[in-house]
Amino acid sequence: MSSSEFVIDMQELESLLDETAGSDGEREFGTAALAFLRAHAQPKPPLSTTWGVGPEHLELFHETSDDEERAEADAALAWQRTKFEAGFGWIGGPSEHGGGGYPDSYDRLFRILEGRFDVPDPSPIRIGIGTVGPALVLHGTSDIVEQFVRPLYEGKSIACQLFSEPGAGSDLAGVSTTAVPVDGGWQVNGQKVWTSNATFADIGLALVRTDPSAGKHAGLSMLLVDMRSPGVEVRPIQQMTGGASFTEVFLADVHVPAGRMIGEPGAGWSVATATLAGERKAVGDRSHENLTRAVELLRHLGDAEGFDDARLRRRWAEVAIGVRASRLRQQGLQSVPAEYVAPAERTADKLLTAANLAAIGDLAADLLGPRFSVDTGEWGTFAWNKWRMGALGYRIAGGTEEILKTLVAERVLGLPREPKELR
Ligand SMILES: Cc1cc2nc3c(=O)[nH]c(=O)nc-3n(C[C@H](O)[C@H](O)[C@H](O)COP(=O)(O)OP(=O)(O)OC[C@H]3O[C@@H](n4cnc5c(N)ncnc54)[C@H](O)[C@@H]3O)c2cc1C
């Protein structure tokens, strides 16, 4: 990169800071953040939208080997450590535990600035810092936060979420993994499934049944499981796209010490709800840079393949408008303090992101015909297949579309509630 390009990038970043910082405090914080980022990372070169140039980058899930996955996790941890040491690793966290104590808007400002730099992909540690960590701060004791949450932000530990089971996904309150009281703690038995990142996680937040005689929700509790305990077995599940980002986790007579319960026995459902709210926000926050780039690549594809058909041209316009509208909506939500944003707004965000991902993949499939399904080696053709198959995962992760639409119908639109006995 030439030095003149570097200067132009920096000017753009200064104006981005001007646009984004809403107060003098945010401006001062943003200036320090920018100085930190400039000292520790290079500006990110834009992803190419030129047809036929560089890798296609159209996969939505990691398609890496175990070794590559571990290396990515180590890189994400190292960058997290660097941020933490400089005061940017846990911007909104409680100051008594090493966090910055800043409002959400500061964290958002940092993420916007960080997004312009070439830093390691945070995916391997995102569940810990974006989902499990915030739920534990809300529901865990001070000891739990110091011993288990702080290391997530310090870049010393990775967490996974042990919720779903073969018989309990949408109906999460139906989990049957049990925890029975034993000397000095709990003994856990059962099976979890679809656990992301479990192969390299240090701790797992596990929803378990502690009282089978209590009501469905009231019998649940939340435990922090050391993933290296005897009796924990992690088996990777291979995805149809080739990689193995998910696992089955078998728990056989796993001992969990007494102090590792989050909240009281029977309070597991409220911790699970707080965790799921964070998860939906994370899916909705999915990088718009990728979506916008995909829309642009689709335009190239359409120009070459089928935009003489007015129906396909129109579909491209609808996809482009959908992505832009969802971006503007998200920016609108980000401009108001988080406490004024109802959880249902986040749910809608996740639904829109997943629908946009799927619509982009569908249009690519219709433009390409058989070349979407058969790898001919031609640039920008079969690569869309990974996008389309990955998009299915986004419709399911963090709550399926059917379940979330029911939530929006009942809690936002006030429609009659679904009869419980049919669930
Ligand atoms: C990318 C990805 C990452 C994931 N990561 C994790 C993780 O880290 N940890 C974890 O614990 N889990 C994880 N999951 C699992 C995820 O939470 C579940 O897959 C999801 O909750 C759906 O559960 P299920 O797969 O059992 O489907 P089911 O609940 O069996 O649903 C099957 C179908 O039936 C429909 N359905 C079910 N009930 C109703 C109803 N009442 N009304 C209407 N339709 C209904 C569903 O919408 C769906 O279409 C992940 C999933 C994905 C795709």
Image (cartoon, rainbow, N blue to C red):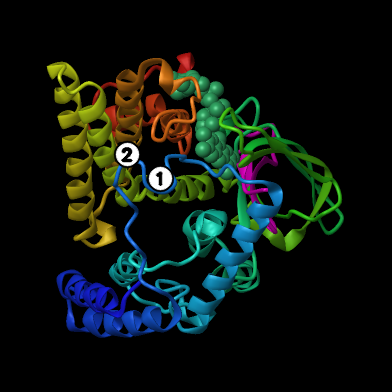
Drawn side of residue 126 relative to residue 391, left or right:
right
- Give, as a single range, the part of the protein colored magenta: 195-221
Quarter of the N terminus within the rendering = bottom left
- Whether 122 is drawn above or below 163: the answer is below
- SS at mark 2 in the image: helix
Q: What residue is shown with label 2?
A: 353
Identified at 70% across, 41% down, the residue is 210
Q: Amino acid at mark 1?
A: Val
- Magenta span includes 219: yes
Say whether mark 1 is within 8 Å of ligand 1: no
Numbered label attached to residue 343: none
Which of the two labelled residues, at mark 2 and mark 1, occupies the earlier sequence position?
1
The answer to whether residue 275 of the structure is visible from this angle is: yes
The image quarter containing residue 70 is bottom right
User: Residue 249: horizontal and vertical position, in percent?
Assistant: 72, 40
- SS at mark 1 in the image: helix
Identified at 36% across, 41% down, the residue is 52
Whether the residues at callouts 2 and 1 have beta carbons within 8 Å, the answer is: yes
Q: What residue is shown with label 1?
A: 283
Q: Amino acid at mark 2?
A: Thr
Q: Within 10 Å of the Cα at label 2, are there few (<14), some (14-19), or many (20+) other Cα atoms?
A: many
Q: Nearer the viewer, residue 252 or 199?
A: 199
Q: Nearer the viewer, residue 285 or 364?
A: 364
User: Residue 269: horizontal and vertical position, in percent?
Assistant: 53, 43
